[in-house]
């Protein structure tokens, strides 16, 4: 049992980060699907490394530069896995009309104007929100970073449960992807992993961030379903990026009232 769970966790770690696994893992579609429950834990790791990096950097660099370096570390740590998905979604939905055309553009490795504009604006918004929170308190932004990475990865997994997976047109270019909804208890395990980092914020009212960020999940799910009938791996990456930013924005809004 423990060995199986460790395999599920390490599978998620291997596919969503560049952190090396020192031994070969068994692989199957079932293992990939079972790894869903550990998406928030991957958020703990990525967010924790980013939070630690920022905490140390701000002692020797200005806060704004420390944040930029932290964002670079995040990209290097994940291989821009989710950012790449967001860029592909911007290009495909921005330049494609109809399901087939959208999916064809989504599989094109080239980046168009919609993708460039989209990722630049997203990163600017992310940086600006993090900078605002960092000015409030360094420990606070460190906690928020962990919460944002954990929550956003949980919500990308939620879409697997709420929407239909869209088969790639060119299966030879398909990436390994968890695309099967597991029993609800598995989703509850992921939710528990998501809730734990909120303890770092020290105020129960910050749990309101969860429904606020989920609004992004609801809208994106509706939009994807309308145009292609479900989600792809790139769509899940987009959910992660958008809901991460919404966590930062939600913290800003709540801080003004708390």
Image: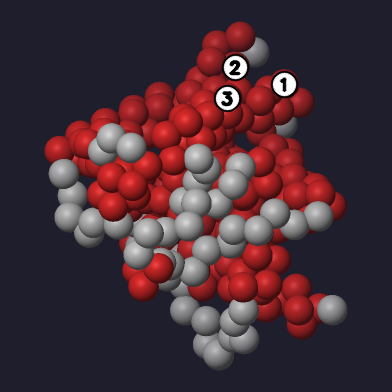
Q: Residue at x 74, y 45 (%)?
A: 191
Q: Quadrant of residue 120?
A: top left
- How far apart are the alpha carbons under marks 1 and 3? 17 Å
Quarter of the image that includes the C terminus:
top right
Quarter of the image that includes the N terminus:
bottom right
The answer to which of 114 and 101 lies nearer the viewer is 101
Q: Quick check: 135 left or right of 47?
A: left
**Which callout, 1 or 3, points at the residue further toward the start of the chain?**
1
In the image, farthest residue toward the top = 257
Q: Is residue 112 above or below residue 107?
A: above
Q: Residue at x 55, y 11 (%)?
A: 256
Q: Quick check: 181 left or right of 70?
A: right
- How far apart are the alpha carbons under marks 3 and 2? 16 Å
Residue tagged by mark 3?
215
Residue tagged by mark 1?
205
Q: Quadrant of residue 115?
A: top left
Q: Residue at x 50, y 46 (%)?
A: 231
Residues at badges 1 and 3 in contact (C-beta under 8 Å)? no
Q: Which mark is residue 254?
A: 2
């Amino acid at each position: 049992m423990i060995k199986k769970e460790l395999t599920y966790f390490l599978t998620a770690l291997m596919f969503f980060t560049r952190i090396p696994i020192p031994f070969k893992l068994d692989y199957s579609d079932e293992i990939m699907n079972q790894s869903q429950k550990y998406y928030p834990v991957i958020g703990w790791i990525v967010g924790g490394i980013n939070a630690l990096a920022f905490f140390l950097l701000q002692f020797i660099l200005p806060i704004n530069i420390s944040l930029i370096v932290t964002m670079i570390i995040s990209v290097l740590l994940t291989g821009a896995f989710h950012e790449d998905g967001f860029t592909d979604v911007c290009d495909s939905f921005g330049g494609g009309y109809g399901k087939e055309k959208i999916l064809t553009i989504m599989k094109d490795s080239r980046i168009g104007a919609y993708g460039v504009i989209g990722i630049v604006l997203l990163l600017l918004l992310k940086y600006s929100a993090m900078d605002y929170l960092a000015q409030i308190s360094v420990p606070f932004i460190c906690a928020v970073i962990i919460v944002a990475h954990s929550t956003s990865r949980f919500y990308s997994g939620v879409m697997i449960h709420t929407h239909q997976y869209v088969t790639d047109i060119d299966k030879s270019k398909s990436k390994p992807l968890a695309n099967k909804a597991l029993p609800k208890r598995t989703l509850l395990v992921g939710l528990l992993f998501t809730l734990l980092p909120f303890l770092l914020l020290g105020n129960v009212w910050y749990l309101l961030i969860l429904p606020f960020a989920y609004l992004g999940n609801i809208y994106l799910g509706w939009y994807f379903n309308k145009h292609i009938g479900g989600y792809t791996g790139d769509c899940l990456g987009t959910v992660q990026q958008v809901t991460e930013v919404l966590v930062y924005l939600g913290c800003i809004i709540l801080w003004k009232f708390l």
